[in-house]
Image (tube, helix red, strand yellow):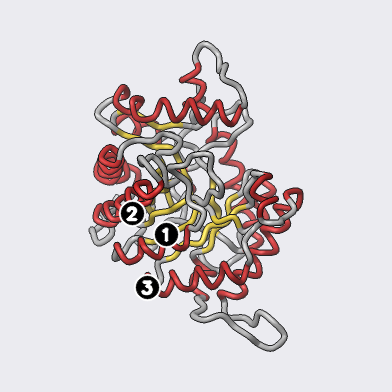
Amino acid sequence: MTLRQARPTRPSTSSGRGNLRLGFLTHVEGGADIAESYRNATELFVAADELGFDSGWVAQHHFSDDPAGGLGSPWVFLAHAAARTSRIHLGTGITLASIEDPIRLAEDVAVVEALSGGRVELGVGSGFGESTFRAFGRDHERRRELTTEHFARTRSALLGEPIDDLGTVIKAPSPDLVRTRSWHAVFSAGGAAHVADEGSNLLLNRAAYGYQEPTDVVQRPWAETYLAGWRQERAPRIGLSRLIFPAADRATSLRHLADGVLEGVRRMSGTTDLGPAELENALFRFNAYYGHPDEITARLQTERVLPVATDLLAQFNPGRPTLDASIRALELIATQIAPELGWTRAGAVPVPA
């Protein structure tokens, strides 16, 4: 059982509207084939845009074992999503900066930033799959150093700084993107301190794997380390990803989540034996919030990291709900859950506390 404590007051890290920002993240999967997965993910962006979500994010996965899922080129997809939406921000959670060419990445990001009218949220991380690093000729053992080096060069290029001794600069740089909308995902307090020193926003994963304690217990000190080390003039931002799937009741939620959650844990642990309470263990490992919106809201209101987060990013992975069920879940999040957590839909007038 998770021990809970009183929920602190939300700090001044909140958004310009004075509220939590709301986003969603998709791993771009679940279709009958890869084309359908891409089309369905696009429809999620369109639906989220109409529902007032502040941001939509995609994960980058190279060489996925799933022939009907996985997105190797997120910026190509986000350029398409930009054309189908009008106001929602478009992010990567994450781009593998460790294997990307930093200047090529800066150019791709700059194109989407220009096409979308300044709606990009650039999230990067190190990645972990050794086969991916071999395929791109990168040293897996140096993945964290490569991420730091490449991200610094990408940010420099996007600031409009010269990329060589001849004074060459990329087309359409975006200093505002670098200063306010660049993110770095980490899995430790030391990583969080590095991100603060770097001046980037902090991305926290849906779950802290490899710990016996609940995810929010593990991640809260990381968030506090980041905030304590922040030295920039602007307010820091913390993006909190969580597996959130509301439905009419818990049974309906589990019908959409159970198979994917069990498969995900078995793949990560390398075993098919998860013990007598295998589904409960799997849901705990993925830190899943599921059931009726009221149940989910009550649990999130006692979440330890959320009070210091500026952005809540809901995702359904490793569950693989249908497109209709996914859109319905986004609707429940936007209308019944997020408003109870301090989110106000874009364009709406916040109600004074």
Q: In the image, 200: left or right of 27?
A: right
Q: Position of residue 110 (x, y in %)?
A: 49, 73
Q: Is residue 274 above or below residue 28?
A: above
Give the number of the disc on residue 117. 3
Residue farthest to the bottom? 166
Q: Position of residue 59 (x, y in %)?
A: 49, 50
Residue at image coords 50%, 66%: 180
Contact flag, marks 2 and 1 (Cβ < 8 Å)? yes
Residue identified by numbered label 1: 77
Residue identified by numbered label 2: 42
Q: Position of residue 140 (x, y in %)?
A: 72, 49
Q: Give the crowd class for mark 3: few <14, some 14-19, many >=20 residues within 10 Å.
A: few
Number of labelled discs? 3
Kind of residue indicated by mark 2: Thr
Q: In the image, 218: left or right of 277?
A: right
Q: Secondary structure at mark 2?
A: helix
Q: In the image, 329: left or right of 183?
A: left
How far apart marks 2 and 1 lie (CA) works out to 8 Å
Q: Secondary structure at mark 1?
A: helix
User: Which sits earlier in the primary sequence, circle 1 or circle 3?
Assistant: 1
Q: Secondary structure at mark 3?
A: loop
Kind of residue indicated by mark 3: Gly
- Disc number lying in front (3 or 2): 2
